[in-house]
Image (spheres, grey):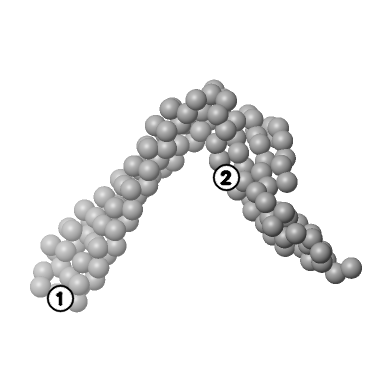
Amino acid sequence: MQKIKVKRPVTIRTVVTKDFKKQATEEILKEIHLIESQIMQLELQNQQMQNQMYSAGFNNEKLEHIQNELNEISAKLEQMTFFKQELQTQKESINHIGLENIIVTGSLENYVELSIGENIYDKFKNAEIIVKDGIIQDIRL
């Protein structure tokens, strides 16, 4: 009989507990701190580039290079600020989730074997793993 293995998505769902909320909040705060330090570095680079621009004088080639660098730094700053705001929104969302609710926290892929005559839609139904405090509670295929 002909068979083939293919990848399919598996959803990770987590039961919200006090420990989950605490751990998720701590991870988000670490990410926010990391982004804040990156923002500070970018602001320092921005200031240094502006100082170089003033010292470049009328060298158009050098001024153009510095302006390109400033534009890149500005774009990165904007992106980092956006990420920080997203993380702060996630942190607030975690505070408002009720205990024992089940939320999607990730996804994985696994292989499923397909054979001639099988219903492909049944094989690709939403597979999911239910987790509570890091321990698998259920696997639904």
Q: Quadrant of residue 96?
A: top left
Left or right of 93 on screen, residue 41: left
Q: Quadrant of residue 95?
A: top left
**Residue 60 tag number:** 1
Q: Which residue of the protein is positioned furthest toward the bottom in this rendering?
A: 61
Residue type, numbered disc 1: Asn
Q: Which residue occupies 20% across, 72% down?
A: 64
Q: Which residue is mark 2?
A: 106
- Foreground mark, 1 or 2? 2
Q: Which residue occupies 25% across, 68% down?
A: 68
Image location (x, y in percent) of residue 139 = 72, 40
Number of other residues with Cα within 10 Å of mark 1, as a class: few under 14, some 14 to 19, many 20 or more: few
Residue type, numbered disc 2: Gly
Left or right of 71 on screen, residue 34: right
Q: Is residue 94 visible?
A: yes
40 or 103, nearer to the observer: 103
Left or right of 113 on screen, residue 17: left
Instruction: Using the image, determine if residue 99 lies above or below residue 141.
Output: above
Number of other residues with Cα within 10 Å of mark 2, as a class: few under 14, some 14 to 19, many 20 or more: few
**Residue 39 tag number:** none
Image location (x, y in percent) of residue 133 = 63, 29
Image location (x, y in percent) of residue 54 = 13, 62
| Quadrant containing the N terminus in the rendered view | bottom right
Q: Which residue of the protein is positioned furthest toward the right in this rendering?
A: 1
Q: CA distance from mark 1 to mark 2?
A: 50 Å
Please state the total of marks drawn on the protein image: 2
Q: Quadrant of residue 62?
A: bottom left
Mark positioned earlier in the residue sequence (1 or 2):
1
